[in-house]
Amino acid sequence: MLIGIDWGGTKIEGVAMEHDGRELLRLREVTPRHDYFGCIRVIKTMIDALESQTGRTGSIGIGIPGSLEPVSRLGKGASSTWLLGRPVEKDLHDAIKREMRIENDADCFAASEAMDGAGAGHNVIFAVILGSGAGAGIAVGGKAHHGPNNSGGEWGHNPLPFPDVTEIPGKACYCGRHGCMETWVSGRAFEAEYASHTNEQLKASEIIEKKRGGDRLSTLLWDRYVDRVARGLATVVNSLDPDILVMGGGMSNVEELYQDLPRELAKRTFSTVFYTPIRKAVHGDSSGVRGAAWLWKS
């Protein structure tokens, strides 16, 4: 069987799958945040549980929040900052003592949706994550594309295009820069924007419900949010022109995104036409763990 582990910033999820994608067992634990070796222990225990409860041994694929520097194999680019500079690959191998394949979680997401999700049948897929952070993965021909720097799809750390005076220099990002897309279009950024106007902490889903009820501020902030997503993705369309945009993360569950984003994106792209389909991920927040399992798909 295929075992996939999605090492996320808030949860660690594991799945045992048949080679045709049928799921045998799924497990989930809360991520011990800022506890690097605690995370590795959870992963080891989860793999053991998947195998003992199914009575089978599986190949192991792990999606991590961030990526591995191609030469040193140290963790880089992770919003889960406790992975940065760590010998992630070595430490996982030392703990699990098995052969495994390790890739960026967004790349696993893209590969999953390319294999049997919203991107199935498309050649070039740009899979966007609008969750607690913001990022993306690229899949070409059903497989994740990484590039020589292992940085393919790092859209969340491009600066917000066409900023107005109120958006310069932008908020500080954990990566050390200011004004990264992640600081504008993540779910947390949307919630922070509302809180800055109201001093009220609401979840994104609650703000959306207020918008649906006719609340003027919530509607204004949603329109501004969609405009920023469109500005960021316009640079992707102008550069890559993918066959499809697949949306994941918590903000992808807002149905209005699929009504409002195509119109705003069309205003921002260089081409006079915009026919790119924008689809919600079929496997939702479980796409990453399935993609990790698919790392061993022959």
Image (cartoon, helix red, strand yellow):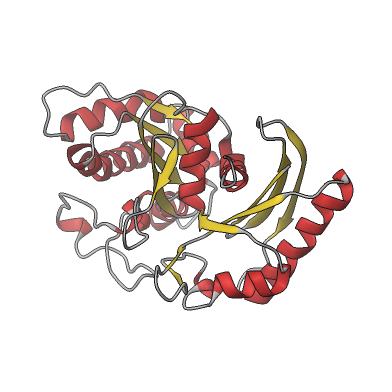
- Note whether 165 is above or below 274 in the view shown: below
Residue 287 image position (x, y, % from top left): 57, 40
- Choose top left, top right, bottom left or bottom right for residue 96: bottom right
Residue 168 image position (x, y, % from top left): 19, 62
Residue 262 image position (x, y, % from top left): 29, 26
Viewed as shown, does residue 265 lie left or right of 22? left
Q: Residue at x 47, y 26 (%)?
A: 120
Q: Nearer the viewer, residue 223 or 286?
A: 286
The answer, for residue 163, to whether it is visible in the render is yes
- Note whether 1 is above or below 160 in the view shown: above
The answer, for residue 207, to whether it is visible in the render is no
- Note whether 182 is above or below 37 in the view shown: above
Q: Nearer the viewer, residue 128 or 41?
A: 41
Residue 288 image position (x, y, % from top left): 56, 45
- Choose top left, top right, bottom left or bottom right for residue 231: top left
Q: Residue at x 65, y 61 (%)?
A: 99
- Note whether 120 is above or below 69 in the view shown: above
Where does the N terminus fall, quadrant-wise?
top right
Where does the C terminus fall, quadrant-wise?
top right
Q: Nearer the viewer, residue 149 or 132?
A: 149
Q: Report the number of numbered marks.
A: 0
Q: Residue at x 40, y 30 (%)?
A: 257
Viewed as shown, does residue 183 lie left or right of 26? left
